[in-house]
Image (cartoon, rainbow, N blue to C red):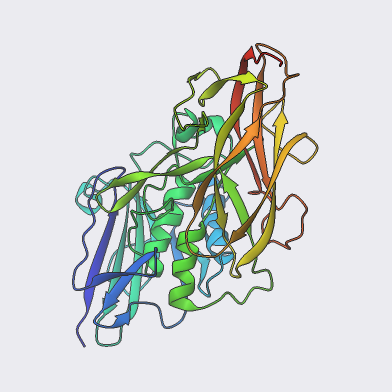
Amino acid sequence: MESYKVAAFFKMLTVLGMICGSITDKSPASTHWHCGNSNLKWPSHYISWRAGTNSFPPGSPRRTALKFATHRWNEAPGGFMFYAENWGDQHVGRGNGQNEIWFSTNASLLNGAPAVCFTEYSCSSSDIEEADVVFNNNVAWTTSDEQTANSPYGGPRRPWGTTAIHEMGHALGLAHEDDTYNVMGQDWDHIHANNGEVRCYVGEDAGNGEVHLYGQTLSTLKNDVGVVHWKHTGHSGEYSTHGPCGIYHLDYSGVTGDYDTGWKRYKVTAGQVYKVQFTYENNGYYHQTGVQVAYYISTNDWITTYDRLIGVSTFTMKRNKAFTHAIDLLIPYDLTLGQTYYLGVVVDYTESIIEYCEKNNATWIPIRIVLKARLP
């Protein structure tokens, strides 16, 4: 029986991917590995990690973060499960028939990447047989959910959870993706924020790929919708690139701003209409119709339905890939000149959908009132 190895390297904005003995296939946006006409996947539909005892010691933030990362995949819509049952692995390595996860400073192993997933598979059976994930211990990682600690928001450290979810995606059979906002592209800014906290997650595109490979989840909670202030901006080799959603004039010309809040704060005129972008995701299994979305003005970055309502819309959200949409919103005239506000969005603000996660339903873009429109 022939066997092959895949080394999936992830390096921000740089292609280091190497796929040996297989080709990739899209379904229809998420990309996965293929042998001949068959998808490469695990026949068991699960991985049980053996975690390096020095990498994930008892009571450590890294062990907690690994549990969270496995949970994020286990709540996703596909029928694949991750477990972390052995925390005492003292002899980690490749090609030993075990699925292991650890930190290393071995340059020859990491090839300059922040993390790498090594996968062994058989083309005769189209089975993935082993996956090992290695994280670069020289990278300044953070497992904190505090927004200011994370590099996408000006913090000093890269979020470990986004990269862990990315590498676990490789482990279950997903390849890199470049044509939509997704965690299998540039992962460090595939992240949700509200109320000063960030949340790492699988996302619509990768979840859709998991469903394609393994069918639907066995969980009773199969629905989830979400919204973020990030969007797809292009690609660098195999990887999608992402950037902040924006606020535009009605002709889509740019609105100026500053970065006093650690995020672009748009300078707007009270009493004027702007186009406001957010990216919406159906992270669950079933298509959703009639999803109610509301827009708010808040004095802080904790967006809730208790804030001031300024607009509503309705979406159909199919499970495929994230979509970015700009809606016309009137900035209320009575806002205080010179004050900073947060223009917020809440998806499923009527709470009509029973979801496995409610923490990703709201986010924001900062604004500052610099002028007031002339009244007619």
Total marks drawn? Answer: 0
Which of the image's four quarters has the C terminus? top right
Residue sitting farthest toward the front: 376
The answer to which of 164 and 247 lies nearer the viewer is 247
Residue 42 at x, y percent in the picture:
40, 78
125 vs 191: above or below: below
Horizontal side of 317 relative to 333 (left or right) equals left
Residue positioned 50% across, 33% down in the render: 246
Residue positioned 65% across, 11% down in the render: 338
Residue 18 at x, y percent in the picture:
21, 60
Horizontal side of 351 relative to 23 (left or right) equals right
The answer to which of 65 and 29 lies nearer the viewer is 29
Horizontal side of 268 relative to 358 (left or right) equals left
209 vs 347: above or below: below
56 vs 224: above or below: above
Residue 197 visible? The answer is: no
Residue 351 at x, y percent in the picture:
77, 55
Residue positioned 35% across, 39% down in the render: 139
